[in-house]
């Protein structure tokens, strides 16, 4: 190469990912733009600087802390922090003022690569978000509050529970129950569990509207499942009109904290084979695959 158009072209970060489509969904939501894609390779950019993603099917699943990270300087790191929280990415280092003169935080993608967003400790000049996100009001809406459910919430919980049942039945009508006239009554009955010490029912609320909930509990040793005591996440659902804003992750994280406070050494859950969005949420929160349910119909 005889010359370089820009000094920045001399050093470009390229990371390996297991699923390029899923990684692109995350990085574009963060504000990266896709310059080009060629099969299992994609060239992204942030404020004119390139960043490469390369899919490797033999890449080992991410375990533990970030394997490495890249620092991204922004003008208002608090604005980016608020946006990232709504996306529900795993946080490795929460936002904090650092001794080296920056205010920063680190989040981790699905393959264990860290993204450290940082800004100077001086007063921000303007928002650190790219213009493509500033024009999208969905990302700028206030995050919901997460709180314990009350008896007044169960009409909304019943509606969301019916949606959860219907979605699963659509995934596999032979395996999952259909919605019936008694479905909402089942979720209404959760109200009797509010005072049970080992039961957790949380709701996400925005502007007085319940837009999601979780239902979880603490369980003893289960020899049929070959596991010791554990927290169990039974249900998690977000209203479709409010998805894609990190609300599921907020609910999940709050539920995990509640289960940890009850003494749960681990948390287990089940997810439908075709529910890819839920699997992405759980993997992003550090869950690993441990059991696979298989079904065979015994019809004549």
Image (cartoon, helix red, strand yellow):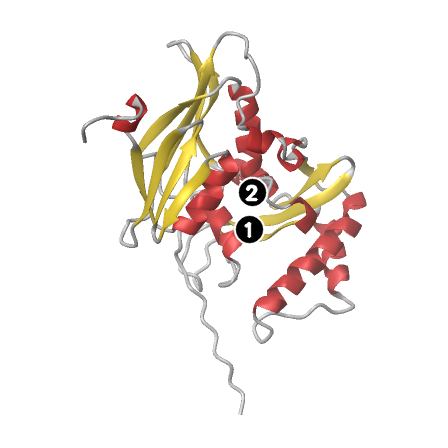
Which mark is nearer the camera, 2 or 1? Answer: 2
Q: Position of residue 229 (x, y in %)?
A: 46, 50
Between residue 237 and residue 9, name the one nearer to us.
Answer: 9
- Residue 267 in view here: no
Residue picked out by circle 1: 233
**120 versus 13 height, above or below:** above
Q: Where is the N terminus found, in terms of image quarters? A: top left
Q: Quick one: label 2, few (<14), some, or many (20+) residues within 10 Å?
A: many
Helix, strand or loop for disc 2: helix
- Residue drawn at the location 58% of the way across and 49% of the way down: 217
Q: CA distance from mark 2 to mark 1?
A: 9 Å
Counting every numbered tag in the picture gives: 2
Q: Name which of mark 2 and mark 1 comes first in the sequence.
A: 1
Pick out the residue farthest to the front: 2
The reply, left or right, for residue 165 in relation to residue 46 is right
Image position, residue 95 (x, y; %): 48, 21
Q: Residue furthest bottom?
A: 300
Residue 116: quarter of image: top left
Q: Can the viewer see residue 16 in this picture?
A: yes
Q: Is residue 269 above or below residue 173?
A: above
Q: Quadrant of residue 57?
A: bottom left
Q: Residue at x 56, y 42 (%)?
A: 252
Q: Which residue is drawn at the image coordinates 44% and 49% (left, top)?
A: 22
Label 1, residues with CA under 10 Å away: few <14, some 14-19, many ≥20: many
- Pinpoint residue 113: horizontal percent, then vertical percent: 35, 36
Residue highlighted by disc 2: 252
Q: Nearer the viewer, residue 188 or 45?
A: 45
x then y, percent, for residue 164 = 65, 58
Residue at disc 1, secondary structure: strand
The disc at residue 243 is: none
- Callouts 2 and 1 close, C-beta under 8 Å: yes
């Amino acid at each position: 190469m005889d010359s370089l158009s820009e000094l920045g072209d001399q050093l470009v970060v390229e990371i390996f990912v297991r699923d390029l489509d899923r990684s692109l969904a995350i990085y574009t939501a963060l504000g990266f733009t896709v310059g080009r894609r060629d099969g299992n390779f994609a060239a992204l950019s942030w404020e004119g600087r390139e960043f490469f993603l390369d899919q490797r099917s033999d890449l080992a699943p991410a375990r533990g802390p970030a394997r490495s990270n890249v620092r991204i300087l922004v003008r208002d790191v608090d604005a980016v922090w608020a946006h990232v929280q709504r996306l529900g990415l795993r946080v490795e280092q929460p936002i904090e003022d650092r001794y080296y003169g920056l205010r920063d935080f680190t989040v981790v993608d699905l393959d264990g690569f860290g993204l450290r967003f940082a800004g100077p400790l001086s007063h921000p000049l303007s928002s650190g978000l790219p213009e493509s996100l500033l024009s999208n009001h969905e990302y700028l809406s206030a995050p919901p509050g997460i709180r314990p459910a009350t008896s007044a919430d169960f009409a909304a919980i019943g509606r969301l529970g019916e949606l959860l049942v219907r979605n699963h039945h659509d995934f596999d009508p032979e395996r999952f129950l259909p919605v019936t006239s008694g479905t909402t009554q089942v979720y209404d009955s959760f109200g009797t569990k509010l005072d049970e010490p080992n039961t957790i029912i949380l709701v996400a609320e925005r502007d007085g509207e319940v837009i999601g909930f979780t239902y979880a509990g603490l369980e003893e040793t289960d020899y049929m499942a070959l596991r010791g005591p554990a927290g169990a996440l039974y249900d998690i659902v977000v209203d479709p009109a409010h998805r894609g804003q990190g609300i599921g992750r907020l609910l999940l994280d709050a539920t995990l904290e509640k289960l940890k406070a009850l003494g749960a050494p681990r948390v287990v859950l089940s997810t439908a084979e075709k529910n890819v969005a839920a699997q992405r949420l759980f993997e992003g929160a550090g869950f690993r695959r441990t059991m696979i349910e298989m079904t065979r119909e015994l019809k004549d």
